[in-house]
Image: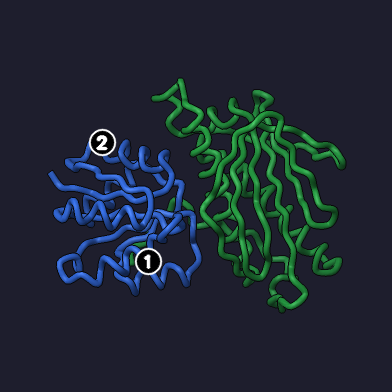
Amino acid sequence: MKKILVVDDSQTVRQLVVEALASSPVEVVQAEDGVDGIEKLSLHPDVAMVITDVNMPRMSGIEMLSQIKREPRHAALPFLVLTTESAPELIREAKRAGARAWLVKPFKAQQLASAVATLAA
Amino acid sequence: MAPDGIDGRLAQLIERYVSRCAPELLDAYGLTLTSVEAHKGELPSYSLAGIVGFVGHVNGTLLVGADPPMVVRSHPLRAKQPEMSERMQLDWIGELANQLMGRVKGRLAEHDVDVRFSPPISLAGTRMRHVATPGRTHRSRFASPDGDELSVWVDAEVRSSIVLPDRFFEDLPEVAGIEGELILL
């Protein structure tokens, strides 16, 4: 079963992601900010995909993405950014850092499950 | 429409985008909101608040205030967790403030107005009230069909040193946001 790391400072959003992926053959690991996301990834190096918010305490999702992508073993790890932000320059910044998809909240469960099935394949 | 100075124009934009974005956001979570006239001078109380600060061309704070019934009715996990803890209610009103700020930021970006905002904080209390600063505080008030209310206060200012983009003053056609849209990069 593939592991998906979900990083968001909102417990509600993390639970919504868990619910959305309940029918998918995945195990969800949760982290509440970018620092916690890096720590959880070190504990679960077999994570197959990361879903991350942008605007979080301690470390933003894009900063976390950049740090993780610097490690060669995670260079190909797919990232989906799930956020309230829609600014084109932020989307470009995430793309440059290596993100594969961007989804602005609120999201539909089926849409997220399909994106995970595609990106974590 | 001719702008009534920078402060007047800022008030126009905030009123326009909060009055559109708050009902759109709550509608996405299954709750219909209608605008209710916010009477000058009244100080309605609330017991839960989500607060986001923002800086950029415009500096300020956005506060969403409501009582627990409104927060629980709009919570996307309400069907699975009918007995919702105060912690989850606080988490949700913070996330509502965060998502509303994201929408308003996106609409202001159409005017080339750039702001960055903080992660939300949430507060619980008894009969909390927001004291408005004249000329700086803009309040929008909404009601659900059950009569529960949600208020949004935006305290905002443009510092005198800021040069605003020309599009700040332009009335633009309404543009749909990209909320819910998956963008493959």
> Which residue is found at the position 56% from the left and 56% from the top?
B176
Identify the residue at image location x=24%, y=43%.
Answer: A28
Output the letter for the chain in blue. Answer: A
Q: Mark 2 lies on which chain?
A: A
Q: Nearer the viewer, residue B76 or A74?
A: A74
Residue B4 image point, x, y percent: 86, 66
Chain identity for the colour green used in the image: B
Front residue of this view, candidates A109 and B42: B42
For the point 68% across and 66% down, the residue is B58
On the picture, is B77 further left or further right than B132?
Answer: left
Q: In which quarter of the image is residue B24?
A: top right
* Quadrant housing the C terminus of chain B: bottom left
Chain holding disc 1: A
- Which mark is first along the chain, 2 or 1? 2
Numbered tag placed on residue A63 in the rendering:
1
**What residue is shown with label 2?**
A22
Please name the amino acid that badge 2 sits on.
Ala
